[in-house]
Amino acid sequence: MNRRAFLVSLPFLYAGRLFAAPSAPARFLLVFLRGGYDAANLLVPVSSAYYYETRPNLAIPKDAALAIDADWGLHPALGESLHPIFLRGEAAFVPFAGTEDLSRSHFETQDSIELGQAAGARSYATGFMNRLAAELGGRGAISFTSQLPVAFRGSAQIANVALNMPASPLGSQVSEGFAARDAVMRDLGDEMVAASRNAVTARAFETQAQRIARLMRGEYRLGFVDVGGWDTHVGEGGAQGYLATRLDELGRGLAALAAAMGDAWRDTVVLVVSEFGRTFRENGNRGTDHGHGTVYWALGGGLRGGRVAGEQLRVTRDTLFQNRDYPVLNEYRALLGGLFGRVYGLDGEALARIFPGTAPQDFALV
């Protein structure tokens, strides 16, 4: 197995300070793509013959993919938005990222990520972003969602401003109605709608990016927004089509956010995640099904970008997980722990309270 490691080796201790405190007020925004987007058509494994063999209708042609490095290319829909940010060194990608959750259920895996607990643990008392907010003093956190997500459940108070309806006052914590609504939506059989959990569309995110930036460059330093519509079982498209349109909208929204942040962009980190990737092979409906490993995106004015980060391997039939999916080589809690240490200057004890039982890893993103 041909693996390439891009992790920085540091002695990770759970006592004492791991990282230097930031020199300016830091900001972090998590963008959650609900539905499990097709990472293999976002960060295209252009050096993999198997990719082109198994995706006769969906593969992005090598000459259409935007240059990243010898092994990877970027979906052409991002040519006017994310690719220029990448070329400026303000964006990076982490493939083979994700969680240990193997349920391939939108709802279970989304909750696993938002809770941020050790393998085998399942308590809905607190989400990892609420625990982070508490470590940051319990102020300056905001959720751009219709109601507070699981990630922000906990004791720290979180402002809640919905992007698809008039602004609401300080949000209440996640209620039992959240799970009940999801059950009803599943019964209706509309999986994509249910998986999105009432998240805004990529188009709505694009139109609301300046509103998010206005709040994030003001009093708020920690934010969460979810974007739905990524469950592409049928008619996904390749260089053009459904997924291409969603990526174009999302990319334009992220570019608008970066521009609207102004000088604060240099102290901002945006991380784009999804609950899982999708099957490496296309299905019989010219789509893809629920997978495992995915690709995270990192953006920011002070990012050490312009590269593909994290542990990697060459994509072949033999390196797929369970002969169907990307494996997870870069565990999300370790990645986020290392990132929070860098962004907020948190020590090992604080990081252990945010992600119990997980040693942080420094991916040298900032």
Image (tube, rainbow, N blue to C red):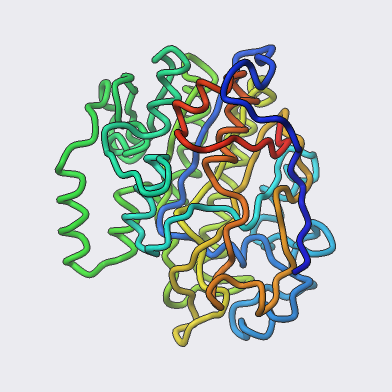
Residue at (30%, 51%) from the top-left corner? 197
Residue 62: % across, % down:
77, 73
198 relative to 54 in the view: left or right: left
- How many labels sit on residues? 0
The C terminus is located in which quarter? top right
Q: Position of residue 192 (x, y in %)?
A: 34, 63
In this rendered view, identify the residue nearer to me: 291 or 29: 291
Horizontal placement of 34 versus 329: left or right? Answer: left
Position of residue 73 relative to residue 19, above or below, is below
Choose between 190 and 3: the one closer to the eye: 3
Residue at the image point whose x is 34% and y is 23% from the top: 158
Quick one: 196 or 112, which is closer to the camera? Answer: 112
At 32% from the left and 28% from the top, the residue drawn is 160
| Left or right of 176 on screen, residue 58 | right
Residue at image position (60%, 73%) is 238
Q: Based on the displayed image, in which of its 4 quarters is residue 266 positioned?
A: top right
On the image, the x and y values in percent for residue 65 come to 74, 66
Q: Residue furthest right?
A: 70
In the displayed structure, does residue 176 sit left or right of residue 365? left
Assign the N terminus to one quadrant of the image: bottom right
Q: Quadrant of residue 15?
A: top right
Q: Position of residue 121 (x, y in %)?
A: 34, 44
